[in-house]
Image (cartoon, rainbow, N blue to C red):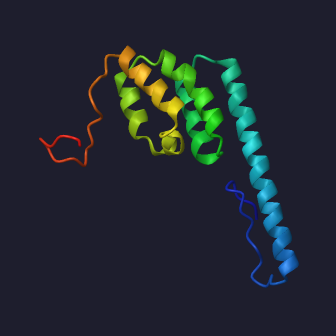
Amino acid sequence: MTHLTGRINIAPGLHDPFEVLVINGLQSLHRRALQRLCKTHEYRALLLDPDNLSMRYNLACSLARELGDPKGALETLKPFFEKVNSQMHIRHLEVDPDLDPIRKDGLFKEMLAAAKTRLGMDDPVIDPAMPSGASPA
């Protein structure tokens, strides 16, 4: 049985190394085909509504986290950073684990800093784990 995650359940009696190798190869092909399909549909959605910042943000999250395409994620986020008009969206973006794979990238940092400056957000991110009254190092 095939699942959306790209995994194939192997029959319990399957022990032949060649069969296992074939199954692993099929899993890899399935995963890559699923990734291409997801990218294609998400990019088509952006063609239909390029100014939809929510869709753009979610596509960037998928590209960064699930599809392993940091360059695509950064390219997708560029218009988001240029047009976002909510400090709340920036605060969410700063802590969203989906963007961890690109968070240390220089371009990401530059775009984030420019958006924060444009929105008048010169204050540091407040870490909810930090005790009240403590200041960041």
Residue at image position (60%, 34%) is 73
Quarter of the C terminus within the rendering:
top left
The tally of labels here is: 0
Query: At which x and y percent is residue 25?
Result: 82, 64
Left or right of 38? Residue 23 is: right
Left or right of 80? Residue 92 is: left
Residue at image position (46%, 31%) is 109
Query: At which x and y percent is residue 86?
Result: 38, 20
Residue at image position (25%, 49%) is 129
Q: Please state which of residues 54 and 81 is positioned toward the viewer in this rendering.
A: 81
Query: At which x and y percent is residue 2?
Result: 75, 61
Left or right of 69? Residue 96 is: left
Which quadrant holds residue 3? Answer: bottom right
Which quadrant holds residue 95? Answer: top left
Residue at image position (66%, 23%) is 46
Quarter of the N terminus within the rendering:
bottom right
Does residue 33 lie above or below 42 as drawn? below
Q: Please state which of residues 133 and 91 is positioned toward the viewer in this rendering.
A: 133
Does residue 99 lie above or below 84 as drawn? below
Query: At which x and y percent is residue 80?
Result: 52, 22
Q: Please state which of residues 2 and 59 is positioned toward the viewer in this rendering.
A: 59
